[in-house]
Image (cartoon, rainbow, N blue to C red):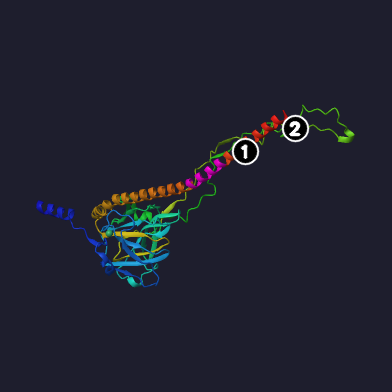
Amino acid sequence: MKALVIAAFLAVAFADPKVYLREQFDDGDEWKNRWVESKHKSDYGKFVLTAGKFYGDAEKDKGLQSSQDARFYSMSTRFNSFSNEGETLVIQFTVKHEQSIDCGGGYIKLFPGELNQEEMHGESSYNIMFGPDICGPGTKKVHVIFNYKGKNHLINKDIRCKDDEYTHLYTLIVRPDNTYEVKIDNKKVESGSLEEDWDFLPAKKIKDPEAKKPDDWDEREKIDDPEDSKPEDWDRSEHIPDPDAKKPDDWDEEMDGEWEPPMITNPEYKGEWKPRKIDNPDYKGKWVHPEIDNPEYTPDSSIYKYDSNGVLGLDLWQVKSGTIFDNFLITNDEKFAEEVGNETWGVTKDPEKKMKEAQEEEERKKREEDEKTMKDEIKDEGEGEEEKEEDDEDEEEEEEEENEEETDTNLKDEL
Ligand SMILES: [Ca+2]
């Protein structure tokens, strides 16, 4: 018995992860046999296989790169269709916007197996859309959209995506207990419950339509003190004639009219009288609309479930092309996905960064050299002019000397 339990435990602990899709583009042009371009439009942008301008590994970092600006892209790959009922579903891939993207999608769509890949387009019904989307400074988010009963639902939370030029690992985990987790670079950035973070279901509670605030419900916390009354000496004008003003001696009433002192602000003016405030003895607090169970609400323990998952598609628009997609993985094992992430993106990310930094350093040096060459050229020309000026000065001095000599001669002559 004990042995059986241990065996069962081991079977669970070391259960082989199910891998529905793993695409790393490491077999040359073979990917072309696995990926299908949609024929829905005739001018889709082309994906090419490349590791890009900089990379951590020239072979491993090869992925699908969008190669034409301002195009729609529509390609997909099929795998054995499966239901994720009772299982965790993990979708993972890497995205590298090495072109420093201004506007464009970096997400995938998970389609049901019945999708006709040659007919795939923006309106094709999908199960899940997941990944980064950037457009200007205003949109830099990770989409997590689920199709629930024929309608697409966006997450209510804002998950910021990476907007630099390096490769990043995006992971979505959907669990059979209707919880989810989003990770970027193998670090959790968001998690929670499907029911709470999407509007799949109507609200559990609604305001009781029968309930109404009673007419005599007093919500005033403070009231005017009825005992308080305005003091008799309160009323004083805001402005009074200046008591210190004197009629000027040269005031001519016939010419200037009757003299009136200028008005000044009355120092004794007290403003508008207001009774003092006291606590309202009838205050009942803010009225809270009572809630009742929403008759429209029915719990659903299978929000996470899709009976058929069979195609992964890149169906997106890019203004500036150059994004590289790689390391696609669909599995039922989040730990396995994490390990795969560490073995792929985790291994090449640092060398990739190094290579880019080295390229930038190279460019910086070249720029400095170019600037120096340009400065030297300008300097050479400038020096020529300076020499010419010096010559002019010498000539002037000589002329002055000559003039002095002449004067001397003249003086001598006069003497
Ligand atoms: Ca690859």
**Residue 214, numbered circle:** none
Helix, strand or loop status at disc 1: helix
Q: Which residue is depicted at the point 60% across and 37% down?
A: 398
Separation of disc 2 and disc 1 at Cα? 85 Å
What crowding class fits label 1: few (fewer than 14 Cα within 10 Å), some (14-19), or many (20 or more)? few
**Label 2 beta carbon less than 8 Å to ligand 1:** no
Helix, strand or loop status at disc 2: strand
Is residue 294 among the parts visible in the rendering? no
First of labels 2, 1 by sequence position: 2
Quadrant of the image containing the C terminus: top right
What crowding class fits label 2: few (fewer than 14 Cα within 10 Å), some (14-19), or many (20 or more)? some
Q: Position of residue 99 (x, y in %)?
A: 39, 57
Q: Amino acid at mark 1?
A: Glu
Residue located beneath label 1 in the image? 399
**Ligand 1's quadrant:** bottom left
Label 2–label 1 contact, CB within 8 A: no
**Label 1 beta carbon less than 8 Å to ligand 1:** no
Q: Nearer the viewer, residue 224 or 162?
A: 162
Residue located beneath label 2 in the image? 240
Residue 140: within the magenta?
Answer: no
Residue 383: within the magenta?
Answer: yes
Number of callouts: 2
Q: Position of residue 332 (x, y in %)?
A: 25, 58
Span highlighted in magenta in the image: 379-391
